[in-house]
Amino acid sequence: MKKREGGILAWAAAVFLLVGMAAGCSRSEEARYQLNPKQPVMITVWNYYNGQTKQAFDNLVSRFNETLGTEMGIIVDSVSYGDVNQLAEEAYNSASGRLGADAMPNLFAAYPENAYRIDVLGKLVDLNQYFSEDELKVYRADFLQDCSFGGNYGLKILPVVRSTENLFLNKTDWDRFAGDTGVRLDRLSTWEGVAETAKAYYEWSGGKAFLGIDSLANYIIVASVQTGNDIYKLQDGQVTFSFDQDLARILWDELYVPYVKGYYANLGKFRSDDEKTGDILAYVGSSAGAVYFPKEVTLNQNEIYRIESSVLPYPCFRDGDLCAMVQGAGFAIAQSDSTHEYASAVFLKWLTQEEQNLDFAVNSGYLPVENSSLNQGYAKAMAAYSGTPEYNPTIGGSAEATLKMLSEYRFYSNPPFEGSYEMRQFYGEYMEASVDNARLEAEDKMKAGMTKEEAQAQVTDEAHFQEWYEGWQDNAAKLLGS
């Protein structure tokens, strides 16, 4: 459900009282785009932020309205839809003119796949109209790689903050497990080591899963890049899908089989939920979700205990490249008129300047997007944050792991294309459905007299692999119309 911030009409009145404040930055541009502090223009911004992240964004909107917005005659109205998928559908419905849909906002948060769908409808502004080359040079280059949709589409999204993925660990229970088994933490730096550790934990714990993965789609796509078997190949602005048996075998051995055998598990809506109930010991999730790592485990009403966290860089394959997904919705400007489009660009530029961007990043668990902020400001801001009463050690641990990744990893984001939104949905759904079917088949075999080991061996044999692989190929062909 969307949440509109109150007091917008009061802002309009306040603007008139504050007209006499400092002059704006470029009166010639203000005149060109018909901005006037005495007759402020209102821009609506749709986002999907929740909790601490929403509060941090709302605080910045208020600061803008009180300062530069007042000087230039711009009022920002922030609307939260509370869920990225809901926002994606609402924005698409608005752009499509669906019956009952709200009017398009001036600015909205969007992942590249959904922004691409809306751009196909001709509804997005090319941001190159409002951002100069020099202004764009300040952003980290691989944070912009998916903002032009991998081709000559113009710049359609501006990253405001970014995130990647980390491995979050219940250190309290890990220490018990490691103390009994001698397993070392550095084994979790590779996916092969994670799978081996998960098997050892399953046996040590009497059948509990070790790991959960929030985004199976991210795992699949990044695995293809790390191992040199890129699932998407981009050439001359065209994307082709490539899913050969080498990649399929890696995903089978290191992802599918551990899930079927119970070494990995996705049980609740989010993996942090599974961590809180003690159903998993670790999970791979967004660095921006560090704030949701639980402070205690609740096994039942009578068994609740505090835990500490440890946060590690995203795992890579032993013979693969150091690579991780860069994610986090950017902001797109909807086509309207030059006044509202320019006002939206002014807000975006202000929001990504170092002071504001670092405030938002540090308080929400995201990364800032400008090179200067990443190279110097972010580490200093996190050090300052560590001394505040609000300090969350998991956010601090995530920042430390991510800073290491920023210096050592390549960040990847797959280019959006016709069908990429549906393909991303398919990856996770197909993997989860095939794992569930295999586990049900194994249960039936055990009821018929097989041992657990025999049943699991059969549902993970070569014949099942070939059937699973053919299912990938057939479903992908249908989605891509080939």
Image: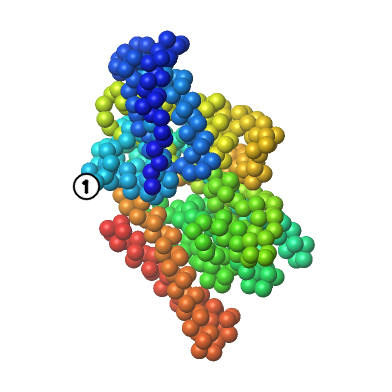
Q: x, y percentage for residue 248?
A: 47, 64
Quick one: quadrant of the C terminus?
Answer: bottom left
Q: x, y percentage for residue 110?
A: 39, 42
The residue shown at (49%, 55%) is: 215
Classify residue 372 as left or right of residue 16.
right
Q: x, y percentage for residue 327?
A: 48, 44
Q: x, y percentage for residue 111?
A: 40, 44
Q: Is residue 287 above or below residue 389?
A: below
The residue shown at (29%, 17%) is: 34
Query: How many other residues sit within 10 Å of disc 1, few (<14), some (14-19) or many (≥20)?
Result: few
Judge whether residue 174 can be spotted in this image.
no
- Camera-side residue: 180 or 193? 180
Q: Quadrant of residue 9?
A: top left
Q: Quadrant of residue 362?
A: top right
Q: Is residue 2 above or below residue 125?
A: below
Badge 1 is on which residue?
Answer: 99
Q: Quadrant of residue 475?
A: bottom left
Residue lying at the far bottom in this picture: please name it: 449
The residue shown at (68%, 70%) is: 205
Q: Total number of numbered labels? A: 1
Q: Is residue 181 above or below residue 390?
A: below
Q: Considering the numbered disc 1 on the image, is that residue within a helix, a strand or a loop?
A: loop
Amino acid carrying mark 1 in the image: Leu
- Camera-side residue: 284 or 405? 284
Q: Is residue 11 above or below residue 100?
A: above
The residue shown at (56%, 58%) is: 273
Q: What colour scheme was applied to this rendering of the protein?
A: rainbow
Judge whether residue 56 can be spotted in this image.
yes
Classify residue 204 as left or right of residue 353.
right
Classify residue 126 as left or right of residue 200.
left
